[in-house]
Amino acid sequence: MKHVKKIAIMTTLLASSLVITACNEAPPAKAGIPPKLYTDSLFAVMNADRANYTKLIIQRLGPNGAGAIKPDEHWKEIENGALLPAQMFRAGSEAVAEVTDEFTYSLQSLWPINKQNAPKTPLEEEGLQYTVDNPGENFYGEEKLGDVTYFTAVYPDVAVSPACTTCHNDHKDSPRTDFDIGDVMGGVVIRVPL
Amino acid sequence: MKKFIWATWILVTLAIAGYYGYILLKADNKQALLIGETSHGHFQIELACSSCHTEAFGGPELIQEACVGCHGAELAEANDTHPKKKFTDPRNADRLSVVDARYCVSCHTEHRKEITAPMGVTLPEDYCFHCHTDIGDDRESHRDLAFDSCASAGCHNYHDNRALFEDFLVHNHSGPWLKEMARLTNPNGAAILASKRVPEQQPTFPEQKAAHPDIHKAWSGSNHADAGVDCGGCHSDVSSGEWLEKPGIAQCQTCHIHEAESYKSGKHGMRLAQSLPAIRPADSKLPFKETALSLQQGCNSCHSAHRTDTLFAASEACLTCHNDDHSRGFASSPHGQLLTRAIAGVIPVEQAVSCATCHMPREENIVDGETVVQVNHNQNHSLRPNEKMIRPVCMQCHNLGFSIDALADPALIRNNFNGKPATHIPSIDWSLKRVAD
């Protein structure tokens, strides 16, 4: 009887330890926001802010509105100069980079005015080309830069007003001069370390 | 014998550790800890170790914070072409492996004077080339340029390109080399702002006033007298209010905040900002007059104590000490001749060009909602690279093309611009051609 009790206790302990060990070894449940949902959400905020800046500031106060501000590429050089929407977007991206490295984003194009905004990594190039070839679709992928693997999302940047197409078509540094309204001019690239 | 060697080794080790430990933790003079000669930019404050090494441990981020603490505002004002924020994106990881442009010290390594170039750069001169290798594909004009000529030929700077970017070149390509009515705005910052800060209650010190009638007479015709600054306004200790025989920057800066702050940012006053004894010409390796070697620099070095003669401060005061070719050439130069004629009353003061016109330029600032013209007392503000001088200084009187050419001609700089530039920088021509094409 004594042995039976001993065996029962031992069996119970063994079973418990197996359960605990199994629990420890089980892969951790996926916590947090999936990368795709994370970048989609970030893009929603970026896009909304950009649209609002264009509509509520540039169009309302610029030359086509009250004429109080002058949107210009070299906005610092002129009185009442204001950043172009694309520059405002980049200023946001640079300001974010100063406070966090949990994600980065940039506005890029296969036909950039500033060559620094051309795709640099193979995945960026593939993503930008994908959004051009598949209008309305986003592109998602993973890439390794340095020692870190990133989730990289590319969202199409579509010409929504004549200001976008005119500026890019007429700019001396623009490699493409036949943009029309509705064309994919580039893409927003959001990158999250995994 | 073995014991003796061991004992000697331990003693020597302890002695060395004790010596450096004492210097590190206790001694006022930490000269022995310097790991190499300091650059021309920092040698004055090399013994204020904590001005850069703010903590004993902390790595490159802390050093970077120290760099930005002193130079950040100027870089932001210069629309820095290569700010750190451009390099933190992971897509630039490959570039960082060549030069880690997130940190100032990657290009400006301190305590390595033997490899420090005039701009404080410790990299070989081809640093631009590594990232801009393909510039020749974009710009026909750049195809055959030397790989080390980007930042050394008067065309580009790493940080400050305010006067050199293509649209500015195109926009300012024309105009006479010398404006017909070249006139400068007179500074009014001190008159407007400092006078508002004069304390209502000032110690009177009647005994001292009575003892120095000549000084009192000289003072009575000065701007200080007009602004209501009595003897006690300057000759009183900031904390105790007691009589102070020789006032210094602590007293001046109670009213002249902008002037004092900018002075302490430059070579003349940077030691004062670190609570070190003021610099003397003897401490520097530049050529100075023998008679001036031991003169400690302060506000009074240029601004006579009881007369406020800014024309003296703007030129003659500089030449009390400075004795290089450029300084010695001033009096006979076209600029110097203008000053001589202004002092003689032949031409208006607004047409005079002094040392300070170029090296302590006037800036239009908005302070408390009021636009004022202030003198930037940081002589280093637009000194290097000298293209920084083009917009705030040269273009007040000259056109852009002449300014670029003149500043790219070392012989012309040496003789203080006595003549026309012997070189021509083609950047404006190339820009115009590219726009026309």
Image (cartoon, helix red, strand yellow):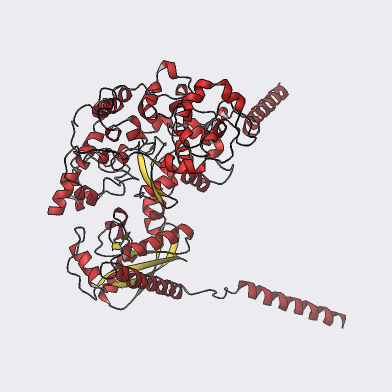
Q: Is residue B143 visible?
A: no
Task: Identify which residue is drawn at 40% across, 62% down.
Answer: A93
Which quadrant of the view contains residue B178?
top left
* Residue most extreme to the right: A2
Point out the image quarter for the N terminus of chain B: top right
* Image coords of residue B112 (percent x, y): 44, 33
Task: Identify which residue is drawn at 28% across, 71% down.
Answer: A65
Which of the pair A169/B86 is nearer the observer? A169
* Residue most extreme to the top: B290
Residue B300's place in the image compared with B202, above or below, is: above
Which of the pair B180/B433 is nearer the observer? B180
Which of the pair A160/B339 is nearer the observer? B339
Point out the image quarter for the C terminus of chain B: bottom left
Q: How many marks?
A: 0
Q: Is residue B104 visible?
A: yes
* Image coords of residue A144 (percent x, y): 41, 62
Which quadrant of the view contains residue B113?
top left
* Image coords of residue A7 (percent x, y): 80, 79
* Image coords of residue A153 (percent x, y): 38, 70
* Left or right, B224 with reference to B116: right
